[in-house]
Amino acid sequence: MKTVTIRRFSFWQRLLINTIMLLAMAGLFHQGLYIKSFWTALIAALILGILNNLVKPVLHLLALPLTLLTFGLFGLIVNGVVLWLTAALVGDGFRFTSFGWAIFIAVIMSIVNLIITNYFSRKTDVNQ
């Protein structure tokens, strides 16, 4: 019998993943995202983690009618808003050139987070 258990990342593991991902996004999409240093990316990832846990559920609840109307696509806008709010709280060391870039980076980060979570958090047990 095959048993699959899913293990969640801790807050600190997710913080490190998001820091590295933000730095990678700033390198790949330098025309849309600016990060001053590693420490700025770490602070941005910390603020993003806090906003994801506290503000994002409220925003999703408030945007529920629009999310249902757009078949879930408005959830991408909510992710962009949280990332844009993170940039506003961090300051000049972390900024987007436009809100469109914030949405685009949020979509890419969501996809990469999904892939990383699915790859690393599965533990398969095969008993015969």
Image: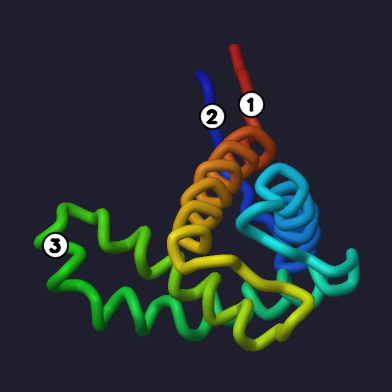
With 114 as the anchor, is 90 left or right in this view?
right
Give how far across and how far down residue 109 sits, in percent: 57, 51
- Looking at the image, residue 128 lies above or below residue 78: above
Q: Measure the C-alpha gap from mark 1 to mark 2.
A: 5 Å
Image quadrant occupied by the C terminus: top right
The local crowd at label 2, few if under 14, some if 14 to 19, many if 20 or more residues have their Cα within 10 Å, is few
At 13% from the left and 72% from the top, the residue drawn is 65
> Regarding mark 1 in the picture, which secondary structure is present there?
strand
Q: What amino acid type is highlighted by mark number 2?
A: Thr
N-terminal-most mark, 1 or 2: 2
Q: What amino acid type is highlighted by mark number 1?
A: Asp
What is the residue that sits farthest to the top in this orientation? 128
Name the residue carrying label 1.
Answer: 125
Q: Which mark is residue 68?
A: 3
Query: Camera-side residue: 46 or 25?
Result: 25
> Regarding mark 2 in the picture, which secondary structure is present there?
strand
Q: Measure the C-alpha gap from mark 2 to mark 3.
A: 34 Å
Q: Are marks 1 and 2 in contact (CB under 8 Å)?
A: yes
Name the residue carrying label 2.
Answer: 3
Q: Nearer the viewer, mark 2 or mark 3?
A: 3
